[in-house]
Image (spheres, rainbow, N blue to C red):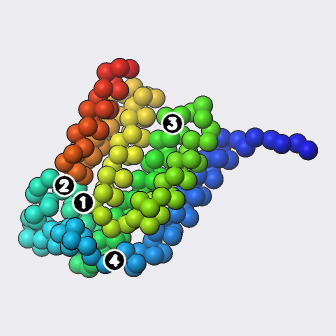
Amino acid sequence: MNSQEPSPRFLFRMALCLWGVSSLFRFWNVDLYAGLSFDDVAYATSGRDLLCEGHGYWADTLRPFATWWIAFFHKINGISVVNVAVAFATLRSLGELFLILAARRLFPSLKWAPLMAAVVSGSSFLGALYGKQHLASLLFTVPFSLWLYCRYLDSEKWRDWILCSIAAGLVFLSHYNTIAALVFMLGLEMLR
């Protein structure tokens, strides 16, 4: 019997397939997550106010990225409660994709890393079932900035560093207590 290890390419493709299934599940069940908690009401209302009046409480304070994102979905889909769930499910799915891509770049010698990132992210409560909270913006911006940081480490081009810096700013705009993530990334760069 010939037991052969799976190739990194095969494992990466499996990670992408798992991401696709997780995203499909999330969007297929988006109506389950369209109910509103207190935070959801605040973001839905603030997104509507931002779109209609040019300002909104959450858009002007500590976590504006989520409100901006919901206002964008209100703009393209009309004002609806479902936009909250669709907007955050989209962020969560994109965040999972960037987590898989970042794991592939951060751990090139660990061929299972992208698949493990997909398994952990997709099977967690915050992965497969989570879709309507402002924390989904963090679950997008942190992996996105990590992936861009990996690009910078590979290329060492200013363009990639600037893109990474913009993404790190989006992390801060996702939640006010994320300054630690920005300091961590700066510390990593200084140690390099």
Write down the quadrant of residue 89 in the picture.
bottom left
Locate residue 129, reporting x and y percent. Answer: 44, 67
What whole-number distance in Å separates the C-alpha atoms at marks 3 and 1?
A: 27 Å
Q: What element carries label 2?
A: loop
What whole-number distance in Å separates the C-alpha atoms at marks 2 and 3?
A: 29 Å
Name the quarter where the C terminus is drawn.
top left
The residue to which callout 1 is attached is 66
What whole-number distance in Å separates the C-alpha atoms at marks 4 and 3?
A: 35 Å
**Is residue 12 shown left or right of residue 44?**
right
Residue 9 vs 14, above or below: the answer is: above
Q: Are marks 2 and 1 in contact (CB under 8 Å)?
A: yes
At label 3, counting other C-alpha atoms closer than 10 Å, the crowd grade (few under 14, some 14-19, many 20 or more) is many
Picture residue at 31% right of the left edge, 52% below the top: 138
The residue to which callout 4 is attached is 34
Three-letter amino acid code of the residue under disc 4: Ala
The residue to which callout 2 is attached is 63
Locate residue 62, reporting x and y percent. Answer: 14, 53
Write down the quadrant of residue 20 in the picture.
bottom right
Three-letter amino acid code of the residue under disc 2: Arg
Picture residue at 57% right of the left edge, 41% below the top: 113
Three-letter amino acid code of the residue under disc 3: Arg
